[in-house]
Amino acid sequence: MTSPETLRVLNRVFGYDSFREGQHEIVDHVTAGGDALVLMPTGGGKSLCYQIPALIREGVGVVISPLIALMQDQVDALRALGVRAGFLNSTQDPDERRLVEAEFLSGELDLLYLAPERLRAESALRLLDRGKVSLFAIDEAHCVAQWGHDFRPDYLALSELHERWPEVPRIALTATATKATHAEIASRLNLEDARHFVASFDRPNIQYRIVGKNEPRKQLLELLRTEHAGDAGIVYCLSRRSVEDTAEFLVRNGIDAVPYHAGLDAPTRAKHQSRFLREDGLVVVATIAFGMGIDKPDVRFVAHLDLPKSVEGYYQETGRAGRDGLPSTAWLAYGLQDVVQQRKMIDGSEGDAAHRRRLSAHLDAMLALCETVECRRVQLLAYFGQSGTPCGNCDTCLSPPESWDGTVPAQKLLSTIVRLRRERGQKFGAGQIIDILLGKRTSKVGQHDHDSLSVFGVGTELGDGEWRGVVRQLLAQGMIAVEGDYGTLVATEAGDEVLYRQRKVMLRREPERAAKPAKSRRAAVSAELPEDAAPVFERLRAWRAATAKEQGVPAYVIFHDATLRQIATESPSSLTALGTVNGVGDNKLAKYGEQILEAVNTLPSTPPS
């Protein structure tokens, strides 16, 4: 049973009549002083789980966040709701810090945001000792997992919070955790005895699609032009050079895009991030240095031009799409070279053999997701220890691929690798091996006399692209491996079982027709709005854009699209009616109510007859 006080705060401050599934149990538990570990997907409403208890409990809620570049926006969003929020980080000058510290000590704040490294300073700990802390919220808690995809060493020290302030409740939150990461978070933060809340990781509005690489930038451009024209989105690349080149390619082809990576100077990174948050329809091309904590609700697509290193990373990155619940796309272009490159990176990585085995296990799980013939969503949920049923909204559900018996082609390829090594003492990459199988008399084939091999020309039943798919899948299944700087291929023990002991090999054949595309943002909005509400919605968006620009904040800080859609549909004629709309709390009603009613009730101008 949700307490009346938490419901009152939810409605008065945040403008919602009811909690999402699972939220109210967490809110009531933390409000009552209990510790909590929360696993909830991006867009599931994690922040309310500590914001509401901080507003109810005596003192100031201290939020530990690694997102220094976003703290200003987080605080602006709360202040727009009438919440007294502040932050302390390295971007402030001494006077700004002193002002926030004074507000904290005098109890004039509801929430205070701190970076984890700040808590390593004794001065920050003494400051918290002098004030009244109502709770500690540890956001992005997966950063404490040492072998996770976003490890931050400063998070390891957060276990000391409970030792220094044993009476203050703690809530740790993350959107990404396997069972192993979940256990590691609990152990490292001393939260084994806390109450654990695990929501479903399913994001049904996201359509997962993985395509074979064939000029990936052109494939990306086609996706943006046909499905996401004018939409905001994120494109992830593995290297800084690829980020720069892809951003330039998109700009040359009429797409408004900017690069983001750690090699850019801090002012440029800040400018590009700010533009992405504040402008409609901007595409950011980035390394994984970008995105954590991005609260932009209308990101309509996340595209990967290179294979992510882990399923956790993939899920976290794709989860930045569709926070508003509207149809969105998670698109990945994946090819043989991705597998070769990732295997080489693991072999050359720092750390011991156990570390490399962990990296290999992460990659194997990612490859399994790419190569599956089953529902992508079911496989993704299974990785996080959750069950699911075929979703009907991923590429393998919409255009099911076939499995085929690839034992004979696998044996031919393995035989070529083995014969080159045994008979000639040679190792080659995929291109030369495929040329031998296809019987191509290239200069390199002639130079090494490979046309005299017994396997020369035995693979003409498949084309070059199909053979590359065989190589990719045998790499994914661990039947061949990559060696050395030149990406040469060798057979493994698992490959020997195929070659000598007739182990069966099942492979995936790509479907001939593509998956049904996701609706674009505009199509989704149009489909959900009555005809007469569409122009009202556009007027409200224009008003919101102007207001956000005037205040120097992202548009979603004013109102989310979902709130504007409800206003346009219901067309309230009074402040009382407007106050019943989801997302319109007391503070925003007082601040913007009259302006919204004016925009709703303005008659469209008609041309003179």
Image (spheres, helix red, strand yellow):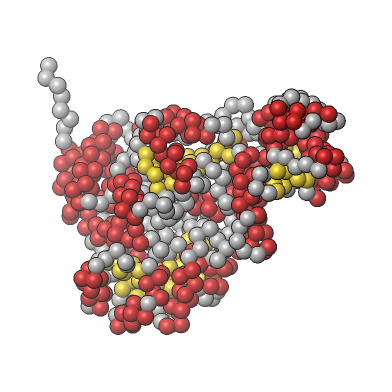
In the foreground, 30 or 154: 154
Residue at screen point 50% across, 60% down:
150
Task: Name the quarter where the C terminus is drawn.
Answer: top left
Task: Name the quarter where the N terminus is drawn.
Answer: bottom left
- x, y percentage for residue 176? 51, 57
Q: Residue 70, relative to residue 408: is it above or below?
A: below
Q: Is residue 166 toward the left or the right of residue 461 in the image?
A: left
Q: Residue furthest left?
A: 608
- x, y percentage for residue 527? 38, 33
Q: Is residue 298 toward the left or the right of residue 388 in the image?
A: left
In the foreground, 480 or 144: 480
| Residue 473: quadrant of the picture | top right
- x, y percentage for residue 70? 34, 57
Q: Residue 100, relative to residue 304: is it above or below?
A: below
Residue at screen point 29% across, 59% down:
72
Q: Residue 545, relative to residue 523: is it above or below?
A: below
- x, y percentage for residue 543? 21, 42
In the foreground, 596 or 288: 288
Residue at screen point 76% across, 25% down:
439
Q: Residue furthest top?
A: 609
Q: Is residue 63 toward the left or the right of residue 588 in the image?
A: right
Residue at screen point 45% across, 31% down:
221
Q: Is residue 239 visible?
A: yes
Q: Residue furthest right?
A: 501
